[in-house]
Structure formats: C-alpha cells, structure tokens
Amino acid sequence: MSYDAKFRVWRGDATAGELRDFTVAVNEGEVVLDIIHRLQATQASDLAVRWNCKAGKCGSCSAEINGRPRLLCMTRMSTFTETETITVTPLRAFPVIRDLVTDVSFNYQKAREIPSFAPPKDLAPGEYRMQQVDVQRSQEFRKCIECFLCQDTCHVVRDHEENKESFAGPRFLMRIAELDMHPLDSLDRKRQAQDEHGLGFCNITKCCSDVCPEHIKITDNALIPMKERVADTRYDPLVWLGNKIRRRS
C-alpha cells in the first residue's frame, strides 16, 4: 500500500537556510531514511544527509523529526498518519554544515578530554582478574552507538551554547561513570566529573534517557549514581572530617 506523504525538510548551510515542502511517495514498511533517499533520487539530488548502516547501530543518521531527536533509520513511517506533515531538521545543538548534516566534533573533543582506563601501576596486564558481577552495572553503557541524540536533547547545551566549554554532556558523563564503576580503575573520576566535566550542571530531567535508541537508562543508572558518589566523597561531613584527620596524621 502506497501513499504520498508531505515532508518539510531543512535546506541550507551555516550561513542561511529554510524549510522546504516536498511530496514524496511512501511504501509499506518504510522508515524516514527511505523517504529521504527517495527524495534525493527524485527531487533533491543535492540534499546532504549522513547515514551508514541503516540498522540503528552506527548512529550516523541522527536528526530531528517533528522537533524530536531521532535516528532516521529507526523511525517508521507507520508512526505517522497519512495526512500528517513530517518535518525533518538537523540536530539543533550543533552547527549546521549543510542540510541535515551537522558538525558534531564537539563530542569528539569531549571524548579526548576524558582519561582512558587506568589500572593500578603495580598490576601487570596478565594479572587482571574480574568477575562478571564486577562489571555488570557498567556493561549497559557499552551499548552506546554514539548517535549523540542525548547530547542534542540535553538542554544544558541545547539552549546554552556557552555551557559547552565546561560541560561534557550525558554521553561522556556516562563514560566517566562507567570508568568510576570499574573495579580496577585507579583515577579519581568523581573529582573529574564534578570539577572538569560539569556534572553539577545536570539536573536529571531524564531527557537524555528518553531519546536513547539503545534504551540506556543514562540518568538513573549513570548520572544519578555518579552524583550520589560525588556527594558522598565531597560533601558528607563525616567523610570530610575523616579526610582532615588523615591529612593531619
């Protein structure tokens, strides 16, 4: 069963742009990325869009559909009515390069700022010994496909460009939490999260978890536990007193 759908697609570059109207044929079982490809093939051959796997595993085709951050390849046309106008725009939190393609280099910059896994210096590689129970809490975070939808929807950077310098965003605060949960990591990840990567900016609205295509509970399982551990080590009066006593001795 086929029908003609109404689309509004953002066209432009870093200097200027606008939403343009298109009518595109839709076939049963298709996703939004299929329609964007048909639009390229039939009406707008110069339309720029990122994509790779078309299976929801590479994170390349991130965009905003009707204002909501989504993967184009995982958004089925059957979720919309045949009379609905579907608006497709680039990720709002990042600079536009052209059409639906944005410059997400901010995220790679933040990734480079996080020190990698650091085992104890006296522990040789062959001496690593862990049980599944040691890593099962953080294993969920390894499902991340780095689509950066959580980064895009986080209002700390989405609505406040000036925060980007001091705020890593939910994807990379989750990475710090993952390392902090690792039984063999030796760095002070709690201090890094709070002082260097802006954990305090997060007010746990759960918007990052809401758009995650891998259904990772970023807020509940990574950010809130990290905030709790920071509070325990930095603001608990008994811990503060114990640190004072140890420093004197």
Image (spheres, helix red, strand yellow):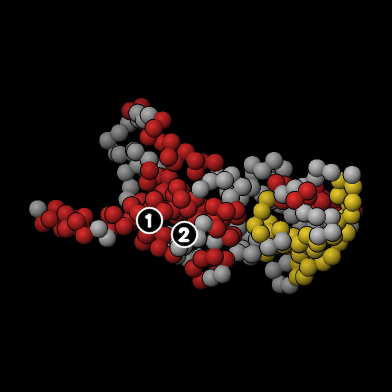
Name which residue lies at 89% across and 54% down. Answer: 4
Residue 193 image point, x, y percent: 39, 56
Q: Total marks drawn?
A: 2
Residue 17 image point, x, y percent: 75, 70
Secondary element under disc 1, as helix, strand or loop, is helix
Q: Is residue 191 left or right of residue 214?
A: left
162 w.r.t. 113: above or below: below
Name which residue lies at 37% across and 59% down. Answer: 194
Q: Identify the residue under disc 1.
A: 227
Q: Identify the residue under disc 2.
A: 204
Residue 223 image point, x, y percent: 44, 53
For label 2, count other residues whose C-alpha is less than 10 Å away and answer few (under 14), some (14-19) or many (20+).
some
Amino acid at circle 2: Ile
Quadrant of image for the N terminus: top right
Secondary element under disc 2, as helix, strand or loop, is loop
User: Of all residues shown, which one is farthest toward the top?
Assistant: 126
**Which of the 4 quarters of the picture holds residue 49?**
bottom right
Amino acid at circle 1: Lys
Mark 2 touching mark 1, by CB under 8 A?
yes
Name which residue lies at 66% across and 59% down. Answer: 68
